[in-house]
């Protein structure tokens, strides 16, 4: 096994000089640094990263915790891609850890990253509540950033989207288009995002004086299959609807299959609105009217905050990110529109 002493001997320097080079010490001459790097490459030496982080108090790594319930889908792909790309841009390694199925497992994942001396931890929590997250932030000195959760007492530690307001806007748009019987497929039970989007749906109906019809609501679980099953259940019920809101694009695509199997056209019979604006949304037939969630901007904001803390720079509370309703071809005027002649709405943002 090649040791640091072997590298030092090959480079003609002391062991402490090799250690300083590996730690990124700027006081080592460039010619000496190059000799050490050449010796490392020729000898095949692989430094013990854990030991090195113990010595330098800096592992050059950032941990990301996400529960596996959202692994299977394009939203997670976008989240992971943006985090990996931006972490690399900052010259650091990303360590992804599965938060699994409970608050306890999310806590274990945090400890796993702390034991590996990550410089910062970003968590997309599914089970940990505000109280537990606040306790974690207060207990540790390293930067913690919480994605997709509002922490009113620690806004400098959280990045989140205005899901309720976005849903209110989306449903309000359908109402403006002349729809009154608007069905809704929710996200997974217990998900803060799902809860917020459902509240936005309820709020929009209430503000327009439309009575909530529980028969027009069905639970989903974020997946294509759950959207299909929920929509099929809605179609089996006697309550009719002219528009359907799905809590994410995946479920909308699954719901579209169920609608077509029941002889319904989109948007001729049923207008369709969803959330997230995944890449396939604009290529779907018809292209989906959906709320664009600014995942890339949210991740960049989180990592900027982390790096500022690591660099000793002051940080400020982060502002919430608003979604944008991207209007495409899956919505036409409903039965209560000012004119019964369908209008094609151009692509744009409200």
Image (cartoon, rainbow, N blue to C red):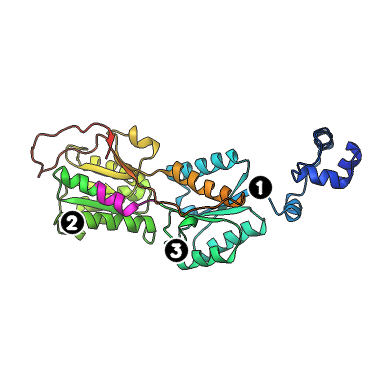
- What secondary structure is found at the residue carrying circle 3? loop
Q: Residue at x 45, y 42 (%)?
A: 297
Say above or below: 265 vs 192. above
Q: Is residue 162 magenta?
A: yes
| Mark 3, other Cα within 10 Å: few <14 / some 14–19 / many ≥20 | few
Q: Residue at x 64, y 53 (%)?
A: 118
| For residue 209, side relative to residue 224 (left or right) | left
Q: Position of residue 321 (x, y in %)?
A: 39, 48
Q: Is residue 310 magenta?
A: no
Q: Which label is found at residue 207?
A: 2
Judge depth for marks 3 and 1 and give the one in front. 3
Q: Position of residue 128 (x, y in %)?
A: 47, 63
- What secondary structure is found at the residue carrying circle 1? loop
Location of residue 348 (image quadrant): top left
| Mark 2, other Cα within 10 Å: few <14 / some 14–19 / many ≥20 | few
Is the stretch drawn in magenta largely helix, strand or loop?
helix
Judge depth for marks 3 and 2 and give the one in front. 3
Q: Which label is found at residue 60?
A: 1
Instruction: From the image, tell me which residue sits under label 3.
Output: 153
| For residue 74, side relative to residue 137 (left or right) | left
Q: Residue at x 48, y 48 (%)?
A: 71
Location of residue 252 (image quadrant): top left
Mark nearer the N terminus (1 vs 2): 1
The stretch of residues the image draws in magenta is 161-170
Q: CA distance from mark 1 to mark 2?
A: 50 Å
């Amino acid at each position: 096994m090649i040791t640091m002493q072997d590298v030092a001997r090959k480079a003609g320097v002391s062991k402490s000089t090799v250690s300083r080079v590996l730690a990124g010490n700027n006081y080592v001459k460039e010619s000496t640094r190059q000799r050490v790097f050449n010796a490392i490459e020729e000898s095949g030496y692989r430094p013990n990263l854990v030991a090195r982080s113990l010595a330098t108090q800096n592992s050059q790594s950032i941990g990301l915790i996400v529960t596996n319930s959202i692994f299977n889908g394009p939203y997670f792909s976008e989240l992971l891609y943006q985090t990996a790309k931006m972490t690399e841009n900052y010259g650091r390694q990303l360590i992804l850890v599965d938060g699994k199925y409970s608050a306890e497992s999310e806590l274990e994942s945090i400890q796993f990253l702390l034991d590996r001396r990550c410089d910062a931890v970003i968590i997309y929590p599914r089970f940990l509540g505000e109280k537990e997250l606040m306790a974690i932030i207060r207990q540790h000195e390293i930067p913690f950033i919480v994605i997709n959760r509002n922490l009113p007492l620690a806004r400098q530690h959280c990045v989140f989207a205005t899901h309720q307001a976005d849903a209110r806007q989306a449903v309000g748009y359908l109402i403006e288009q002349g729809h009154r019987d608007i069905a809704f497929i929710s996200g997974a039970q217990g998900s803060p995002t799902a809860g917020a989007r459902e509240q936005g749906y309820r709020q929009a109906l209430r503000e327009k004086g439309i009575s909530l019809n529980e028969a027009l609501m069905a639970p989903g679980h974020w997946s294509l299959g759950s959207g299909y099953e929920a929509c099929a259940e809605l179609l089996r019920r006697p309550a009719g609807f002219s528009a359907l809101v799905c809590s994410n694009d995946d479920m909308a695509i699954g719901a579209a299959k169920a609608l077509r199997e029941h002889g319904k056209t989109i948007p001729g019979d049923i207008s369709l609105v969803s959330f997230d604006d995944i890449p396939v949304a604009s290529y779907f037939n018809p292209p989906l009217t959906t709320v664009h969630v600014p995942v890339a901007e949210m991740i960049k904001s989180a990592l900027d905050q982390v790096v500022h803390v690591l660099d000793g720079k002051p940080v400020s509370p982060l502002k919430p990110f608003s979604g944008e309703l991207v209007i495409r071809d899956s919505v036409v005027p409903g039965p209560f529109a000012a004119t019964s002649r369908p209008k094609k709405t151009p692509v744009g943002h409200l």
